[in-house]
Amino acid sequence: MRIDHVMIGARDVEPVRALLRERHGFGLVLGGRLHNGTTCWIVPFDSSEVQYLEVVVPHDEAAMAGRGIRESFMERTAAGPAFLTWVVHVDDIRETAERIGKVLGDDGGLRHGESVRADGQRLPWAEAGFAAAWRQPSRPFFLEYGDGPGRRARVPRELAAAEHRRTPTAFSSITVGGHDDLSDWLGGPGLPVQADPSAPDGVREVTIAVRDGDAGRAETALRLP
């Protein structure tokens, strides 16, 4: 189990592109159109674990409404780019869905799908807990991918296309707000996540390890309104 990616929502990609470049030295590459009515852009990390930031913007509000995310997406992004949720990679999505189903006292939300990247590559996935995480974004949802080698093979190409000024290499930590006890949801400790019960629910800060040219290794803290 590890942090896979963090999702940022925005009405328009350009303000996020400018913020990431100017404050953090990160570039964006087009990911593709998603089944839920959004288009995704990627900040690829130089990591064999294929970690990244994902920026999602609307392209089909009717499809977003059909997935039940349009209203809350628009509300959360009304003041500008905002963290939407975070995502944990697991090796056994069925076991995870069963476990979080017990936490919820309801269906664990196991779903299978496929992402089509901008270059046509198809990446199968399975998820659990998305709806619960969307309602309570201090909690992540969970993913398992069907083509790990295919995902890893993309990293060098995406890094070249992103043209980072500072290259992100790993998630150092995530700070979330809210009073929820994450241990049951995550199935135990082990991830670099900190809870701030005085802060509003959801992701509040993401600290990212970077390789900064001649300056060597450092960290940068990403915060959004």
Image (cartoon, helix red, strand yellow):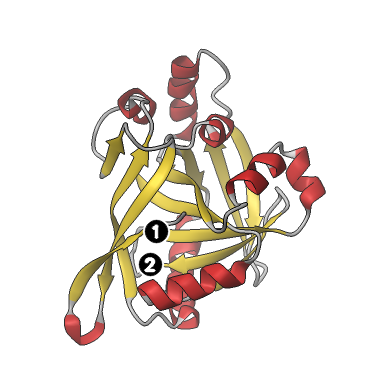
Q: Of helix, strand and loop, which one carries label 1?
A: loop
Distance Cα–Cα, label 1 vs label 2: 6 Å
Seen at 63% across and 55% down, the residue is: 115
Classify residue 86 as left or right of residue 65: left
Seen at 33% across and 24% down, the residue is: 181
Q: Quadrant of the N terminus?
A: top left
Is label 1 in contact with label 2 (beta carbons under 8 Å)? Answer: yes
Crowd class of label 2 (few under 14; some 14 to 19; many from 20; radius 10 Å): many
Give, as a three-letter code, the residue at label 2. Answer: Phe
* Residue where numbered disc 1 is placed: 51
Q: Of helix, strand and loop, which one carries label 2?
A: loop
Q: Residue furthest right?
A: 62
Which is more toward the observer, 71 or 91?
71
Q: Position of residue 79 (x, y in %)?
A: 58, 54
Q: Residue furthest bottom?
A: 214
Seen at 52% across and 66% down, the residue is: 42
Q: Position of residue 50 (x, y in %)?
A: 40, 60
In the rendered view, tell whether residue 102 sits above or below residue 67: above
Give, as a three-letter code, the residue at label 1. Answer: Gln
**Is any part of residue 1 visible from this angle?**
no
Q: Quadrant of residue 180?
A: top left
Seen at 44% across and 77% down, the residue is: 21
* Residue where numbered disc 2 is placed: 45
**Is any part of residue 120 visible from this angle?**
yes
Classify residue 57 as left or right of residue 193: right
Q: Position of residue 43 (x, y in %)?
A: 46, 67
